[in-house]
Image (cartoon, rainbow, N blue to C red):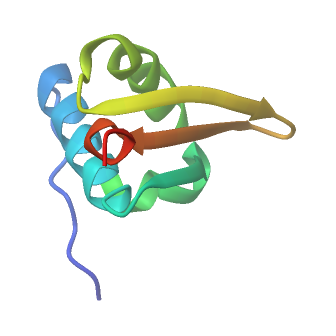
Amino acid sequence: MSATVTPSTDGSSKEERLKQYLLEKAQDGEMYFKSKFIADDVGLSPKEIGALMVKLRDSASELEIEKWSYTSATTWRIERRDALTA
């Protein structure tokens, strides 16, 4: 069984948890994902992830966040800003 993330009612900790996950996953450059595919990894619902991505787009200076496409669900593109300057 994999490690579980403790759910929290504190919005800022959910946001921080998602931000840390994205920073780790985009460590080598850019990453594309749909919220429903990372929901279990971060212990959030796809709807919560979508709402937090909008917040992170404005607040996470370490990440470049782009709403990439919308087919059956939004695809997000993220890239670490430090990778942009390398």
Left or right relative to 7: residue 45: right
In-image side of 21 versus 84 (left or right): left
Residue at horizontal 15 percent and vertical 53 percent from the top: 6
**Height in image: 44 above or below 53?**
below
Please tell me which residue is depicted at 25% across the width and 42% down the height of the picture.
82
**x and y percent of residue 25 in the render?**
36, 60
Of 72 and 60, nearer the camera is 60
Q: Is residue 48 visible?
A: no
Quadrant location of the N terminus? Answer: bottom left
Give residue 73's position: percent from left, percent from top: 75, 37
What residue is shown at x 20% (from left), y 76% (from top)? 3
Observer-nearest of 60 and 44: 60
Residue 82 appears in the rendering: yes
85 or 40: nearer the eye? 85
Residue toward you, 80 or 42: 80
Question: Which residue sits furthest bottom?
Answer: 1
